[in-house]
Image: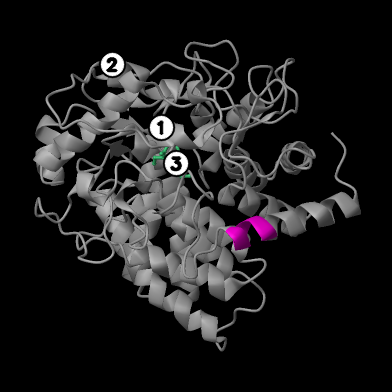
Amino acid sequence: MAALSASAAKTLWQGAIDVLRENDLGEWTRPAPSLYPHQWSWDSAFIAIGLSHVNPARALRELRALLRGQWADGRIPHIVFNPLTREDAYFPGPSRWSCLPVGAPAPREPLTSGICQPPVHALALHAILDLPEIGPQAPLWHEVADLYPGLLRWHRYLASSRDPDSQGLITIYHPWESGTDNSPRWDAPLARVGVGDMPPYTRRDLAHVIDPSHRPTDAEYDRYIWLVESLKLAGYVDEVIRERHPFRVKDALFSAIFAAANAALAAVANRLNRPSSERDELAELEDRFSRGVGACWSESLGLALDFDLRARAPIEVKTFAGLAPLLLPRPAGGLADEAAARLESAEFAGHPSLGFPVVPSTVPNSVGFRPATYWRGPSWPVMNWLLWRGLRQHGKLDAAQRLRDANLALLAQPAAEFAEYFHPFTGEPLGSRHQSWTAAAALDWLAQGDK
Ligand code: 9WN
């Protein structure tokens, strides 16, 4: 797929800046104009990476605002609620999560959810610190240094509470923690969740979407909300959750992002001249999680698989998350080569029916695939950005450029409008329009050029 012309690139760049401006609420950015009115954790990390190219100070404020929601135990919640938005603007809102009333170590202000999302934040902090204008004398240097301890505490929470037996794999308690909510990855473990008695609720997401069949079903939502009730009953205490919560899965993609984030935070620690014990700790975490993800590789599927702790079995589905080893800075053996080859194979970006040769969220026509449904088939530009970053880090520059060009061509379609996700066969925009992280990924692709 040909690279964009200079004028198309310029138009896309300006459009992306406009989307981030439209969604900018001062100190943080909402993921999209109406469907997502609060601050989401990994969205903000990607947004900070995009913003770093236009306003690094604002990019750091994005992370700072998110850290205001950090819990005393170090966890960064997946949503930091906007106090100026009505409780019913998004469901579940702060009172359904009820973090403070059940005694969780959550801040009084701002209110937050009680679960996490993948830790992309250190990638953002590292990208900002790497900007040529940020040297030790620059004012922003000190702001980076101020944010570092919060991210270190976050990484320590994940390493200790979500991987207590040091397998090098993060346990998630809810499909929302994976960030790939409705993926076929979660069908089997979710099917094992029995829904108990809970207060009635009204879904808000369906009011904002053009076609409700693209969103998760009511049965899936019942389980999502029941899992929130179960976490609340456990007081959000990890030790209790581990004993009795009905959804506990080792997430390969989350773990690979964590490995990459530890390498990034170690690099930040190095630049900031932090004690060598911290740098060693982060390097060890990178190594532990690289080994954990490596051990998830299935030779027969050619993918890394998640592991259902309740069923004690790997989850055999074919989704983009299986390409996770590409994100590891130092994977064992030839794993990066195998994952890179898989990415361009006829099941992923090389599938003959694709409208654009980008990576779909689920392998077309595999179990659980639905082309227009949330995380079940459409392609997410920002997830392609993560894989592109992985290709580049392993020196696969031609493949990286092909993936970048194909994504930019997808986004440059006149109707694309920085949509949340795209139909894999037609390239039709789906979900929210003016999605912040889609704009952020475009900015980074355009700023990085063809290097
Ligand atoms: C639940 C905001 C978030 C993303 C997730 C995406 C979706 C929420 C939802 O939107 O999740 O957290 O209501 O569906 O799956 O990755 O962070 O963009």
Let me know if residue 263 appears in the view. no
Quarter of the displayed picture in which ligand 1 can be seen? top left
In this rendering, the answer to whether 279 lies above or below 324 is below
Q: What element carries label 1?
A: loop
Q: What element carries label 2?
A: helix
Residue 107 is left or right of residue 366, and the answer is left
> Of label 2 and label 1, which has the lower sequence position?
1
Residue lying at 56% horizontally and 30% vertically, measured from the top left = 210
> Of label 2 and label 3, which has the lower sequence position?
2
Mark 2 nearby-residue class (10 Å; few <14, some 14–19, many ≥20): few
Please state which amino acid type lies under the numbered disc 2. Ala
Disc 3 to disc 1, C-alpha distance: 17 Å
Mark 3 nearby-residue class (10 Å; few <14, some 14–19, many ≥20): many
Picture quadrant where residue 232 is located:
top left
Q: Main secondary structure of the magenta part?
A: helix
Q: Is mark 3 on a helix, strand or loop?
A: helix
Residue lying at 35% horizontally and 75% vertically, measured from the top left = 275
Residue range (magenta): 18-22
Picture quadrant where residue 378 is located:
top right
Q: Does the residue labelled 2 lie within 8 Å of ligand 1?
A: no
Which circle marks residue 233 in the picture? Answer: none
* Rendering coords of residue 191 (x, y %): 28, 16
Please state which amino acid type lies under the numbered disc 1. Asp
Please state which amino acid type lies under the numbered disc 3. Ala
* Rendering coords of residue 260 (x, y %): 48, 50
Residue 339 is left or right of residue 70, and the answer is right
Which circle marks residue 181 in the picture? Answer: 1
Question: Label 2, on which residue?
Answer: 191
